[in-house]
Image (cartoon, rainbow, N blue to C red):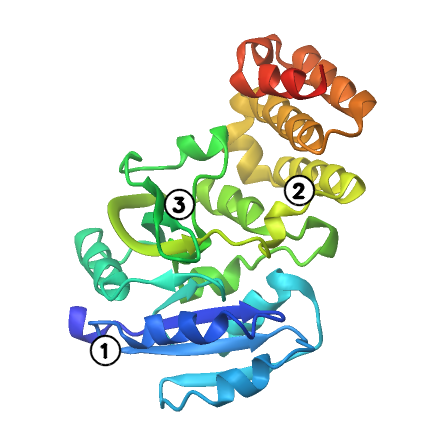
Amino acid sequence: MQANIFFSVVIPTYNRAGFVAKTIQSLLAQTYPHFEIIVVDDGSTDDTEAVVKGIHSDKLTYHKKKNGERAAARNTGARLAKGDYVNFFDSDDLAYPVHLQTALDMIAAKSKPEWFHMGYDFRDPEGNLLQQVNELPEVLNERLVKGNVLSCNNVFIRRDVALQYPFNEDRDLSVTEDYELWMRLASRFPLWHTNQISSTVVSHDQRSVITVNRDKLIRRQELFLKYIWQDSECLRKFGDSKKNMEADVYTYIALHLALTKQHRPDVVRYLFKSVVTEPKALSTRRFWASLKHII
């Protein structure tokens, strides 16, 4: 079985000319040789195209499309993929040489699972280790209810599953589109995990998740709740945790707004909503951290 597994690594990218070459080179350095890399350029206006086309490898293909945000780029890559499994890798992060071999070992151990996840770490642009994520349970379905602990780089989805359950392309959901898909998949299939670290998230100041826009943040999080609860399988599987998840989203909004040192009325409003929804929110660190930043 192992010799027949072929991987498709899809790299969605937008204006990452200064990062994407290192990402591609880290993937080309894999110890396991049976894979392709599909770069889906989501309408870049910088030198991304020239950078990618300057890397010569028969494993690498480049596809440019009109801008549609990451979900659309990832779905495009999944449709182009030839592999048994699809891995969506961010264009500013790095894979360790064992990335695909670790995935191969998981596929063998779990008998070709629908999807799975592997350990990862965070490093600064100079390569200094900031944090390791390698203490998660073997099955992560219930853990996802408490927040998105997955690195998209380390999620592998069997291609037939990826095509049946694509990313939600609502542009207003962008940045949280991965978590929304993880919840849909977790309501249907076991989510296996290994704590073996196989990639690194590079923490730089251009990462889109760092920027906070009040209206977009609120809209995105409220859409997340809307989409997961309108999914019948999510409601069936995780309905008992509905109040906890909603309260968690409200404190998430409150904290991120509080960190801007602005929007004090909104912070208070969402903290109030969290406690009304689930009184236990009052005992969470995030609740008190939000208050601390506005007092």
Q: Position of residue 200 (x, y in %)?
A: 36, 55
Q: Position of residue 186 (x, y in %)?
A: 45, 42
Asked if the residue under mark 3 is in contact with the one under mark 2, i.e. CB atoms within 8 Å, the reply is no
Name the residue at 69% across, 78% down: 45
Provide the residue designation for mark 3. 189
Name the residue at 49% across, 30% down: 145
Q: CA distance from mark 2 to mark 3?
A: 18 Å
Task: Label 1, secondary structure: give it.
Answer: loop
Q: Is label 3 or label 1 in front? A: 1
Provide the residue designation for mark 2. 227
Q: Sequence order check: which comes first, mark 2 or mark 1?
A: 1
Q: Position of residue 141 (x, y in %)?
A: 40, 36
Residue 155: name its quadrant. bottom left
Q: Nearer the viewer, residue 123 or 134?
A: 123
Q: Sequence order check: which comes first, mark 3 or mark 1?
A: 1
Q: Sequence order check: which comes first, mark 2 or mark 3?
A: 3
Q: Amino acid at mark 3?
A: Phe
Depicted 274 relative to depicted 8: above or below = above
Depicted 281 relative to depicted 191: above or below = above
Which label was assigned to residue 33? 1
Q: CA distance from mark 2 to mark 1?
A: 38 Å
Left or right for 61, reference 207? left
Q: Residues within 10 Å of mark 2 (few under 14, many from 20)?
A: some
Q: Residues within 10 Å of mark 1 (few under 14, many from 20)?
A: some
Q: Position of residue 98 (x, y in %)?
A: 22, 63
Q: Amino acid at mark 1?
A: Pro
Task: Label 2, secondary structure: give it.
Answer: helix
Please state, as top left, top right, bottom left or bottom right, where the N terminus lies in the image. Answer: bottom left
